[in-house]
Image: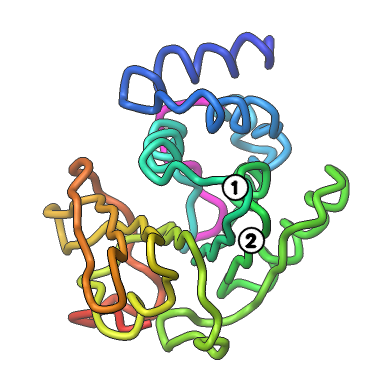
Amino acid sequence: MDISQARKNAIDNQIRPWGGLNYIANNALRDIPRENFVPDKYKNLVFADIEIPLTDKAKMLSPKVEGRLLDALKIKKNETVLEVGTGSGYLTAVLSKLCKSITSIEIDERLSNSAQQKFKKLNISNITLEVGDASKGWKRSTDFFDVVVIGTSVPKITGRFFHLLNVGGRIFVVEGTGKVMSAKIITRLSEHKWETKSLFETQLDVMQGLEKSAKFEF
């Protein structure tokens, strides 16, 4: 496989046609070697339009979803990011190229440790990794962020979670159950006002710990 050509094809034929038009974000996707984050047995599918399995409970997002969420969030270099679900670490690394700093939470310690090793090899230093169960709340809830990225679906996002955002901050989340799920951007317009915009319909696995829950109160 010609990796460089495959990477270009993924951006030109998957990401851009699906609304991933932010050239700064696409450059970050191009700069981080996705093949370094894909399990060996799936190397031949590194840029396929699928969610690549990492464990029996975790998957990588498809390239077109990664591109679309980055396009919608329009992350700036002075902004701080919270990611729920480190997974392979690929999207975390891409996000780190776009922001000031990123904190990423992962429930599976093995995945978190594996991602950390990959970041070291790429000399990425603005990522803080945390191991924990985000479905039960976040212990550092006094922190505020400009961007929050949730890498799984949640039945319904409510309550304290919105208050993690600085004014002007944005959350990307896939909300819903079963076959009815919608990717959304939620923007904090003021201290007590939020705006929700639906982006596209999709289906993602539900966040671990929320399989039988009616809502996600972070």
Residue displayed at 46% across by 63% down: 57
- In the displayed structure image, the side of residue 108 where residue 176 appears, left or right: left
- In the displayed structure image, the side of residue 57 where residue 195 appears, left or right: left
The residue pinned by badge 2 equals 102
Q: Above or below — where is 58 with respect to 11?
A: below
> What amino acid type is highlighted by mark number 1?
Leu
Place of residue 181 in the rendered image (x, y in percent of width and height, measured from the top left): 18, 54
- Decide: few, some or many residues near mark 2? Use Cα within 10 Å; few <14, some 14-19, many ≥20: many
Q: Is residue 106 magenta?
A: no
Q: Above or below — where is 176 with respect to 213?
A: above
Residue displayed at 52% across by 62% down: 83
- In the displayed structure image, the side of residue 179 where residue 110 appears, left or right: right
Query: Which quadrant would residue 218 be assigned to in this image?
Result: bottom left
Query: Which quadrant would residue 158 be assigned to in this image?
Result: bottom left
The residue pinned by badge 1 equals 95
> What amino acid type is highlighted by mark number 2?
Ile
Q: Secondary structure at mark 2?
A: strand
Q: Which residues are magenta?
A: 47-56
Residue displayed at 29% across by 75% down: 211
Place of residue 4 in the rendered image (x, y in percent of width and height, measured from the top left): 68, 13
Q: Secondary structure at mark 1?
A: helix
Q: Above or below — where is 14 with respect to 72?
A: above
Q: Is residue 55 magenta?
A: yes
